[in-house]
Amino acid sequence: MKRCVIVGGAPIARYDRIQPLLRDDDFVIYCDSGLKHQEKLNRKPDLIIGDFDSHEKPDTDIETIVLPTVKDDTDTVYAVKEGLRRGAEDFLLLGVLGARLDHTLANVYSLIDLDEKGKNAVIADDFSVMRIVSHSTVEIAPNWRFFSLVNIDGSAHGVTIRNAKYELDDAEIPCSYQYAVSNEPLPNKTAAVSVREGRLLLICDYE
């Protein structure tokens, strides 16, 4: 399957940063009130999912999955599962951060679920792009202003950061002490981060 892009209903102000992330061959799922972003993203949905408690169900021929309002999965989590069911290996989640903290945290933790399943997944918002660092080294281009590593899954061991203002070598980052925040790639250098054991949330900030 093509990359699965899931658009939620959280606020998006910087469409100029979000729209360039989209590809012509993306499979785009709009979740409920995520439909409000359709015009400014200039992308039609391939699939619409929602219980439509926050947006009117559209009158359209586009495939639509109507969910019950009483359910275990949020609309976004259901959309992730639907993307997996259809064979997606790569995911981009948009409009899933901000507004409600409970939904924000649930959506961030969906990155862990996808990483556990061996999928590539990224969340992007107006300020940053984030992904999980686990089994492979991740590079950070020098055009990113700041980057942070946040432990959201147990204790991370063997954390290494290279070509950055603040470097680490075989360090530990516990959930209780988040000290790897607001780092910077060295000028004209590509920073690299890795972890031997555990998972870290890598957040790269535009400014």
Image: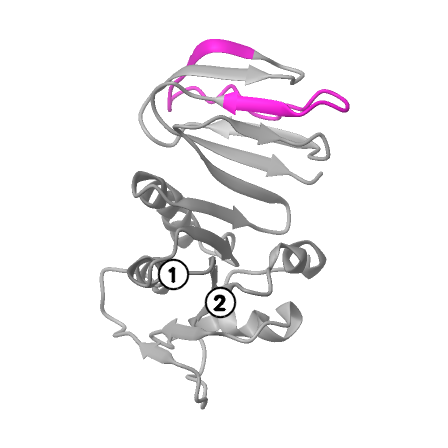
User: Picture coordinates of residue 164 (x, y %)?
Assistant: 65, 18
Task: Look at the numbered discs 2 and 1 and tell me whether their residues touch, using CB distance below 8 Å.
Answer: no
User: Picture coordinates of residue 82 (x, y %)?
Assistant: 32, 63
Examine the rendering and report whether any part of residue 133 can be seen.
Answer: yes
Q: In the rendered image of this protein, does residue 177 appear above or below residue 152?
A: above
Q: Earlier in the sequence, mark 2 or mark 1?
A: 2
Residue hosting label 2: 28
The magenta stretch is 168-193
Query: Which dot, 2 or 1, sits closer to the camera?
Result: 2
In the foreground, 109 or 121: 121
> Disc 2 versus disc 1: distance between alpha carbons?
12 Å
Residue 192 is inside the magenta segment: yes
Residue at (71, 33) in percent of width and height: 145
User: Picture coordinates of residue 101 (x, y %)?
Assistant: 43, 50
Residue at (57, 23) in percent of width and height: 192
Q: Check disc 1: other Cα within 10 Å, few if <14, some if 14-19, many if 20+.
A: many
Q: Check disc 2: other Cα within 10 Å, few if <14, some if 14-19, many if 20+.
A: many
So how many labels did they put on this image? 2
- Horizontal side, residue 165 vs residue 157: left or right: right
**Residue 63 numbered mark, or none:** none
In the foreground, 10 or 131: 131
Examine the rendering and report whether any part of residue 13 can be seen.
Answer: no
Which quadrant holds the C terminus? top right
Amino acid type shown at disc 2: Val
The secondary structure that dominates the magenta segment is: loop
The image quadrant that residue 115 belongs to is top left
Amino acid type shown at disc 1: Thr
Residue hosting label 1: 76
Q: In the rendered image of this protein, does residue 187 appear above or below residue 17?
A: above
In the foreground, 127 or 130: 130
